[in-house]
Amino acid sequence: MSKGFSRRAFLGTALSALAVPAWAGAPSVSLRPQARPGDFARTVATRGPSAPSTRALIAEAKLSGRVGFAVSDAKTGLVLEQGDGALGLPPASVTKAVTALYGLETLGANHRFQTRLIATGPISNGILQGDLILAGGGDPTLDTNALAGMAAALKKKGLREVRGKFLVWGGAVPFLRAIDETQPEHAGYNPSLSGLNLNYNRVHFEWKRSGGNYAITMDARSDKYRPDVTMARMRIAERTSPVYTYRATGARDDWTVARRALGNGGARWLPVRQPELYAGEVFATFARAQGLKLGKPGITKSTPSGTTLVTHQSDTLSKILRGMLRYSTNLTAEMIGLAASAARLGKPVNLRASAREMTAWAKSSLGMSSAKLVDHSGLGDASRLTASSMAGALGRAHRAGLLKPLLRDIPLRDTRGRALKSQPVKVVAKTGTLYFVSALAGYMTTPDGAEMAFAIFTASDSLRAKVNSAQDERPPGAASWNRRAKKLQQALIERWGTVYGG
């Protein structure tokens, strides 16, 4: 049966306990294109059991748009089947799979990001005669718990007083106000980029009805702490729409929300547009709890120098990538891509320049000759990849021992959205979704052990042209179009399992 993938299969909260190889560094097998078998003319007619044709499956999906797909033998690179495989289409978050390979080859699987507390002067009797700087190193996973730990570690160092300023530095990454300026201002998946990021650069907004009014909180909560935040403020406005408005007012993010949209209560994460000040305020809160009073954070543009008092290290890159590929966190992808480009070029570069560098790398190392990427996350819809090049890249990664252990299980489902326990085909893949864009790329394994790399890209330019991304959170028809696209993805996978499973 051809059944649709459910969104829950892509965005569920439980992590799969997949083993990740303990790589010692950059991959020992080059990702550069290897020679592939020459028998590319093998067709469905020469293979085993019959199955619906790809043309019939695409017609049945009734997608007003374009479809490109390709599937190959993951072990040999032999192309088994493709349709419009050379057609450039938006890859959406499938881009993150390319970013993962870019980061692994450039930085190595054991790479860790660092966040430091630096003293610019001498310390005597617990008194710092100079400035204290919270210096970011581009860690995409820095959270409230980590800042609490850094404050506690600073106390253990014996620091009791800072005579200079408390400064924050995010210059390890060129600042960008938003990944994609065409997205809604309040979209938490579209935060600012900086070398100093906290909680994926999102602040938690919660409201509860209290009589005729609302109690509002803005905080940087974690599973252990809930520090209030003042640099992001919310005001209730007497209007119906828009739901949110934003403006930067000096050192604050000022938000308004329409009263009629609030109901009895709720919560959501909003993007932070001044991330260094956000992280600085939260750290100062924890430092104060440790007996160290710091003033309001100020931003320094100069690369900090001095004595490093405390260093927080992130998890290894391989663990960070596992989370990125399963939860599709855009900020993580951008930070990893920017770090890889800085390592390759010897200096930090902005997002567009970094995307060009990753595009050049994908062409030379993955054989993706027609690649065009505008970011590392896939949020920008101007990016283009072809299904054939994506399937080929996945095959090369598989033969190099990369990526597959980091991808998430994608169960095939019945008409009610339930996982088909008896389904013999196993799929691990990365999904990608924008309005009227749906992509899926990864690996499938049949019961007899046949392993295939595949990519399926679908997009409707005509329908996307009608969407105002800055305002339309739920464009008419987008949800049903997406369901049909996912149904087609499953139908193609089931076909390949039948035809090429032997």
Image (cartoon, grey):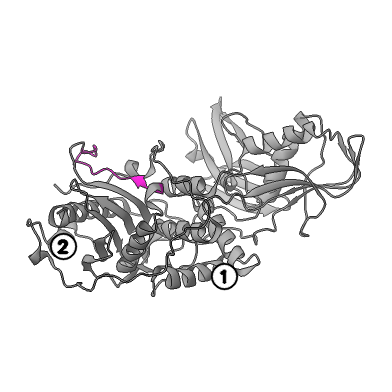
The reply to whether callout 1 and callout 2 are in contact (CB within 8 Å) is no
Q: Can residue 372 be seen in the rendering of this structure?
A: no
Residue marked by disc 2: 54
Residue marked by disc 1: 353
Q: Does the magenta stretch include residue 408?
A: yes
Q: In this view, does 439 lie to the left or right of 223?
A: left
Quadrant containing the C terminus is bottom left
Residue 433, percent from left and from top: 37, 54
Q: The residue under label 2 is which amino acid type?
A: Thr
The quarter holding residue 58 reads bottom left
Q: Which one is nearer the viewer's eye here, 151 or 112?
A: 112
Q: How many labels does the image show?
A: 2
Label 1, secondary structure: give it.
Answer: helix
Question: Dot 2: few (<14), some (14–19), or many (≥20) neighbours within 10 Å?
Answer: some
Q: How far apart are marks 1 and 2 (CA)?
A: 38 Å
Region in magenta = 406-420
Q: Can residue 499 be seen in the rendering of this structure?
A: yes
Q: Earlier in the sequence, mark 1 or mark 2?
A: 2
Label 2, secondary structure: give it.
Answer: helix
Residue sitting at 15 percent across and 69 percent down? 42
Residue sitting at 33 percent across and 61 percent down? 395
Q: In this view, does 270 lie to the left or right of 55?
A: right
Q: Is residue 46 above or below residue 189?
A: below
Q: Is residue 371 above or below residue 221?
A: below
Q: The residue under label 1 is which amino acid type?
A: Ala
Residue 107, percent from left and from top: 55, 58
